[in-house]
Amino acid sequence: MASKIYFADLRASFKKNLLSKLTILLESVNLKGIIHPHSLVAIKLHFGEKGNLAFIRPNFIRRIVDYTKEMGASPFLTDTNTLYAGTRGNSVSHVNTAIENGFAYAVVNSPIIIADGLRGASFEEIEIDKDIFRTAFIGKEIVEADALISVAHFKGHEVSGFGGTLKNLGMGCASRKGKLQQHSGLSPKVNRKRCAGCGDCVEHCGQDAISLADKKAVIDQQRCIGCGECIIICPNKAIDVRWSSDTVLFQKKMVEYAFAALTGKKGRSVFLNFLINISPDCDCLPFNDAPIVRDIGIMASLDPVAIDQASVDMVNQLSPMDNSCLESRNMVDDDKFQRIHPEIDWSIQLSYAEEIGLGNRDYELITI
């Protein structure tokens, strides 16, 4: 049976603005039937790296918080710490970055609790018994929450092709140990002819795995954790993944972690995708490139697989934006994410998620 996806476009009026349409979406998925009084509700989102402005506006998050509080629940905003050397590698800098990006309590009416502790070492070991992982390491505060609302900014991604609900759950709910497990199969390499020896990758690497030798970057594979951030940070595109089965395995690992994040929360999870400012790469970068298509709207569902499938389909039905990273401007119904990251088959995450019972790729789109 097709899963229901509720969709609100960005048309607004005096009587119905975007915040009121978001409320209608929450009503459509029957959030009041999922969130019980006195429950602790994790609102899982991405606060945005410092310098990146593609993240979801705090005003939308405030509406979700207020609606949840109307049910007598206690929501908190959450994410887990990163592996790379950005501004969210520990809870102190993570919360400071969130506040700088507008997620202060006075704005969002909710506390921020980083789910995996001060340095990413606070986790619960979740038994999943899947093809790759027997157990997964999920941020403790997400595991202990009574319910979960996933709020994902839908965009491209340099390793999974696109990032939506599944990535927000799989990578976003994993502790540092869990992130290491997922990234362990990725192995970047340096193209010495392209490398200009600028040192940007050296400065950005959180594992001290990159150094300069003879004015060229060198990666210590023993130290490298495969997080892939050096691939995007390099201004000369001199670092790339050893494309083989790496990204296939990565996507399957990520999906198994999404399964782990939802373990114990059957019937107590809701998923939203914001198809706004659809950037070509992850919000973890300290910048965001121009959107690849126009802003589309907001989706809500009880199915994490269907909502990502619907989001991909909706993006691919549109014409590319002028002045974006997509080279041709006259193609409609083509695969935008495959054109940005041609080595990545993003459909793997969806098909594997369906295979292990996370959801259904068939959907019914209901426009509110």
Image (spheres, rainbow, N blue to C red):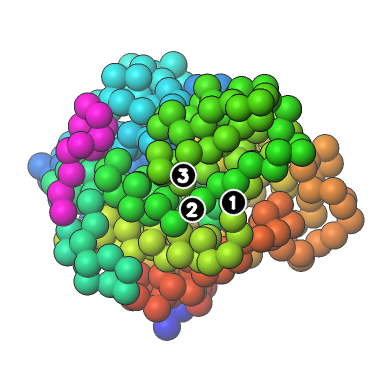
Q: Which residue is mark 1?
A: 241
Name the element at disc 3: loop
Which of pointers 2 and 3 indicates the residue nearer the eye?
3
Magenta region: which residues? Answer: 113-125
Question: If you read the primary sequence from the N terminus, does the residue marked by circle 2 or circle 1 appear first?
Answer: 2
Residue 21: x %, y % from top left: 49, 45
Residue assigned mark 3:
221
At numbered mark 2, what does the secondary structure look like: helix, strand or loop? loop
Amino acid type for the residue under numbered disc 1: Val
Nearer the observer, 311 or 118? 118
Task: Name the amino acid, label 3.
Answer: Gln
Q: Is residue 241 above or below residue 58?
A: below
| Image quarter in which the N terminus is found | bottom left
- Considering only order in the chain, which callout, 3 or 2, is on the residue closer to the N terminus? 2
Q: Is residue 258 left or right of residue 56?
A: left
User: Height in image: 63 above or below 103?
Assistant: below
Picture quadrant where residue 198 is located: top right
Furthest toward the left, the residue is: 38
Assess whether residue 119 is covered by the magenta stretch: yes
Question: Is residue 84 found left or right of 328 in the rendered image?
Answer: left
Residue 73 horizontal/vertical position (percent): 17, 41
Q: Residue at x 23, y 49 (%)?
A: 138
Numbered disc in front, either 1 or 3: 3
